[in-house]
Amino acid sequence: MNLEKILYNKDFTRDELVFLLSLEGEGMKMLLDRALEVKLREIGNKVHLRGLIEYSNVCRKSCLYCGVRSKNKNFSRYTMDDDEVIECAKLAMDMNYGSLAIQSGERSDGEFTDKITYLLKEIKRVSDGKLGITLSCGEQSDKVYRQWFEAGAHRYLLRIESTNKDLYYKIHPKDSIHSFETRINALKSLIENGYQAGTGVMIGLPFQSLKDLADDLLFIKNLDVAMVGMGPFIPHSDTPLYEFRDKIPSPRVRLDMTLKMIACLRLIMPKINMVAATADQTISPDGREDAIMAGANIIMPNLTPAKYRDKYMIYPNKANVNDKPDQTQDSLDSKLKTINHQVVYGKWGDSKAFIEKQD
Ligand code: 5AD
């Protein structure tokens, strides 16, 4: 295949994507450079922030890769108080972040879903409607998604994790609360309810092939989502998938694969919002900046109160666990400046792909 020619395509076949994902050295550099060029042309050098609140590590699920799976009894469970959530929202306002992202383990009981509704309304009230809100609270019913949308959430991230159904069931228990179909339907419900919906996958999973990753990209394109968050898989010793830690590529190769996935997606979906994930930074100190240079445009600084941080260990050695929000801001600004990017303050930073679809 002729790389120089392919890089000017907007659509790719599965074979072409496999070819791009297998690039190394100079070829890989050409792919990343092209993705950066397309990003700068389509959405510019702006980086939008989502102040991250890790609201609760209580989870009803037991995903085989995730450190906060319900079967892991090696740490205590927490749910933030209402006041603590509001304090985080005020901190985001003080630092002029345009948006918040509320993440949580998955619960579907009414006490939880009503609490989220209440918190959304409170955040809207105390911020005078100024803070944009992304939710990441797992699979919920159509009714709950509607309720949360009406309460003020307007973006929702639900990773599909892997679009290969066989692989999906290798990394999730085979039971009714971990159903592949339910997850796909939840994504469709989010889109139908008017959210800027986001999805994504883990990269470098055991049993995952380049064809799987190429199919993931085609699935994401086909679903026409507004946002994407993807990152490298990081084995956690308290999870069943840890057993296969020797069967996955090295951290460097997983990060490079993540960068190539981001770059390919930027070529196919030039205007979406794409997160430079904390997991990128966890496996390499400059991983987050590398992701920005490969086509990502969103960063999620952690606002979770210090006392909860080490209890939200979805994977080990999570980067930024000890960061102080105000220091983070200065170092983030200057780090991004060195790679010719600029943090945007005081704006929601919605996906351009979504905005243009509304017009
Ligand atoms: N490594 C990398 N990412 C993980 N996630 C969960 N566990 C891991 C892990 N071990 C990601 C999943 C999930 C999100 C909350 O974190 O993609 O959707």
Image (cartoon, rainbow, N blue to C red):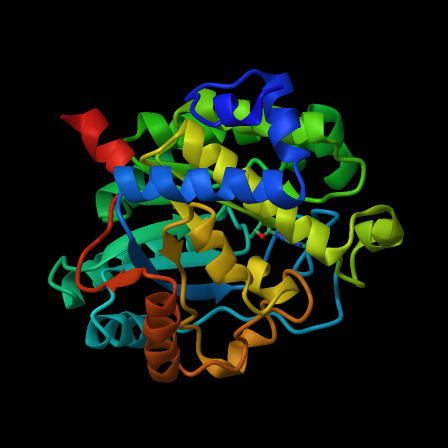
Q: Position of residue 167 (x, y in %)?
A: 74, 31
From where the camera sits, is residue 57 visible? no
Q: Is residue 161 above or below residue 309?
A: above
Count of marks, rendered view: 0
- Quarter of the picture holding the N terminus: top right
Q: Could you say which quadrant of the image residue 203 lies in?
A: top right
Q: Position of residue 316 (x, y in %)?
A: 69, 67
Is 10 in front, or is 223? 10
Residue 241, compared with residue 272, is above or below; it is below
Residue at the spot 55% in from the left edge and 71% down from the top edge: 78
In the image, is 357 to the left or to the right of 303?
A: left
Residue lying at the far left of the rendered structure: 128
Residue 189 is situated, as x and y percent measured from the top left of the image, at 40, 27
Q: Is residue 346 left or right of residue 45?
A: left
Between 27 and 290, the residue placed more toward the observer is: 27
| Of the pair 50 and 2, the residue shown nearer to us | 2
Rendered-image quadrant of the C terminus: top left
At a point 65% along the width and 74% down the height, the residue shown is 76
Residue 264 locus on image (x, y percent): 51, 34
Q: Is 207 situated above or below 87?
A: above
Q: Is residue 193 visible?
A: yes
Q: Residue at x 41, y 22 (%)?
A: 10
